[in-house]
Image: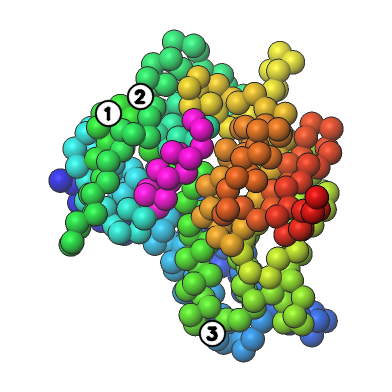
Amino acid sequence: MDTNDATLDIIPREEDWRFKEASADDPHRYHEANFYAFNTIVTFKASGDRDAVEAAFLAGRDACRTYERLFSRFLPHSDIARINESRGASVVIARDTYDVLAHSLRYCELSEGMLDITMGSVTRLWDFHRGIIPDQESLDEAVAHVGWQKLKLLDGDDVCIATLSDPEASIDVGGTAKGWIADRLIDLMTSQGLEHLFVNLGGNVAVHGGRPDGTPFRIGVKDPRDASQILGAVSIANGSVVTSGLYERMFEKDGRRFAHILNPQTGMPVETDVEGVTVVGPRSVDCEGFSTTLCALGIEYGMDYARSRPEITTAVFIDRDNVAHVVDKTVPSASK
């Protein structure tokens, strides 16, 4: 069995850290921290004693470093990278990695075939930054190694083990891990005394306690065609808001759009009438776990699916005409 020393891995921009003390002009008196992790900008906001808030933020940053060293498929000593390089051998993994993988497998099972964390063999063929489309033969070969059922987890008394039965299969938890991390960060920093907390992991937002004045946080819903613009906002005091959209990574070629959400059965981008979806619920791990599935299912089936999942409070689907279609379980249905 393989073992790990992830501390050997250097995280890109690991030294980045910016703490901004609350301004006297800010009615909520938020302290703010920004740093780079998980290939995105992470933002923490909270009110309270400056030193206590900064200490909690630093603990949150350190936790992010630990999680990235465990979950990144690009860091050679991470648990995920070691599983992918194991060629079918069993790998000893951290309990946190076990937890992320167990949650991920659950969302794969519930996704109606639209989410699969063993898509690594396929995703590595696509380059959405340079607009490169893989050839059909390569895609067909890669898809043959996709199947979340190939990953087996063992939770022993003293050790957790992962085994990927297909030597050519490859795991990528980029579509599930940040939600789990956001929930953990909320737990960590509230345990250190923060009462009004905002966490943003590059679009995965988790909040606790609302604003100091008793009002909920307002989280913007991005315009899928222009991520710098906001179409509306979601009010939430405790819980999470996660947005998934085709706009995140996409290119056009020969008049056809190619987006980064891929169909596990074909290896090609999903065909959907959804440009973006925002999912609201008590736990970020659920919001992220279901967001890709809702995007891929399309508006009609996606809305039915959102209604069926108790983990989802609200889902906002944006179609290609920038029209919003909303499932909102916080609004009582009309009695007959």
Real-space CA distance between mark 1 and mark 3, rounded to the nearest whole angstrom: 46 Å
Q: Residues within 10 Å of mark 2 (few under 14, many from 20)?
A: some
Q: Is residue 91 above or below residue 36?
A: above
Foreground residue among 93 and 281: 281
The residue that mark 1 highlights is: 166
Amino acid under disc 1: Asp
> Are dots 1 and 2 in contact, CB under 8 Å?
yes
Q: Can residue 152 be seen at all in this image of the molecule?
A: yes
Indicate which disc, 1 or 3, sits on the residue closer to the N terminus: 1
Residue 72: horizontal and vertical position, in percent? 41, 48
Indicate which disc, 1 or 2, sits on the residue closer to the N terminus: 2
Extreme-front residue of the structure: 336
Residue 79: horizontal and vertical position, in percent? 31, 49
Q: Which mark is residue 145?
A: 2
> Are dots 3 and 2 in contact, CB under 8 Å?
no
Magenta residues, as a range? 100-113
